[in-house]
Amino acid sequence: MGRELVERVYGMRLIKGIDWEKYLLPLVFVGFAVLFAIINPAFLSARNIVQTTRQGAILFFLVCGQMLPLVTRGIDLSQGSVMSLTSVSTLSFIYVLGPYLGSAAGILTGTFCGLVNGVLIGYVGIPAILVTLSMLFLASGVTLVHTGGVTLTNLTEIHRIKLFWFGGEMVGPFPVPVIFALVIAIVVYYVFKYTLLGRHIWFVGANPDASAMGGVNIKRTILIVYTISAFMASLASFFLTSRLCMGFPRLGEGWLVLSIGGAIVGGTSVQGGKGGVWNAILGAAILVVLDNGLIVSGFSTFAREAIIGAIIIIACSISLLRSRV
């Protein structure tokens, strides 16, 4: 009995002691890439690499946004519906305001959902899971009522060309969404590393009671966190919408699981207090390479969903084990 206890404790310490973000997760990413390249060399074709990085940039926006609530011991379940609302709002506003102002108005519409989430969670005190679940249904309902479930199209040729640039064009060898993702990554890294807001986000997640006693404005921090989360989801939706040049009332379906899963796979703790831009990059990169690799390898949609779900469960289990040691 004593030996089993020692082995169990040692095993848990070993799990926690491994520098996952520095060693293991990059190796997992490289391992997946090598495996799928062996299965199908088309995985490393220029066209597939561009497609993968484009999708990876969109997933990064979502994962980076989801990482912030998780760090503060919360969660944002409304990201998928915010994406759908932003997509439809963007097309609707473009009809009236043109491609640039219309796109900005669409992104602000989605961001407003996060502002409402932040007020209800931070200032009213309603649990995050209840607020964001309610916003999921609210945003989805508004979107479907507005469109009747019909995809919005019929952009003028000039508007379509201007909108498509953001989601479908290249700047040199890089897809436009990748460039925007790099800019966002640098900004978020700076905020976490060098600003008071970044430190407050860490403190709230690590120890809310001590943070309050130390003078951290928890309510305002929570408000900002959920507003940024919705803003990131709106950006992801915008780049998807601009590539397709259509407003989809169900655009966000399927992305929420990847958002949460990517954050956790990347090393963001499910217990709060741990996460960052590097975690978001790793999580998004691993999941998008896994998903794309399974596609080029001929796996069915159902098989891909099962494999990705299993990976997310394993990541959650490891995260919990590490937090308990």
Image (spheres, rainbow, N blue to C red):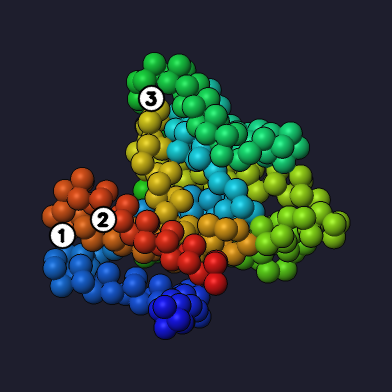
Pick the residue in front: 129 or 38: 129
Q: Give the number of the mark in front: 1 or 2.
A: 2
Task: Sort mark 2 into few (<14), some (14-19) or many (20+) by Cα contacts within 10 Å.
Answer: some
Residue to which mark 2 is pinned: 307
Residue 88 visible in the shown view: yes
Q: Residue furthest front?
A: 1
The amino acid type of the residue labelled 1 equals: Ser
- 70 above or below 119? below
Residue to which mark 3 is pinned: 152
For residue 8, which quarter of the picture?
bottom left
Residue to which mark 1 is pinned: 297
The amino acid type of the residue labelled 2 equals: Ile
**Quarter of the C terminus within the rendering:** bottom right
Pick the residue in front: 150 or 134: 134
* Distance CA(mark 2)–CA(mark 3): 33 Å
Q: Disc 2 on helix, strand or loop?
A: helix
Percent position of residue 198, x then y: 70, 61
* Distance CA(mark 3)–CA(mark 1): 33 Å
| Image point (20%, 45%), residue name | 302
Contact (Cβ within 8 Å) of mark 1 with mark 2: no
| Image point (60%, 34%), residue name | 131
For residue 42, which quarter of the picture?
bottom left
| Image point (34%, 72%), residue name | 28
Percent position of residue 155, x then y: 39, 27
**Is tag 3's residue or tag 1's residue first in the polypeptide sequence?**
3
Q: Disc 3 on helix, strand or loop?
A: loop
**Is tag 2's residue or tag 3's residue first in the polypeptide sequence?**
3
Pick the residue in front: 128 or 299: 128
The amino acid type of the residue labelled 3 equals: Leu
Number of numbered markers: 3
Task: Sort mark 1 into few (<14), some (14-19) or many (20+) by Cα contacts within 10 Å.
Answer: some
Contact (Cβ within 8 Å) of mark 2 with mark 3: no
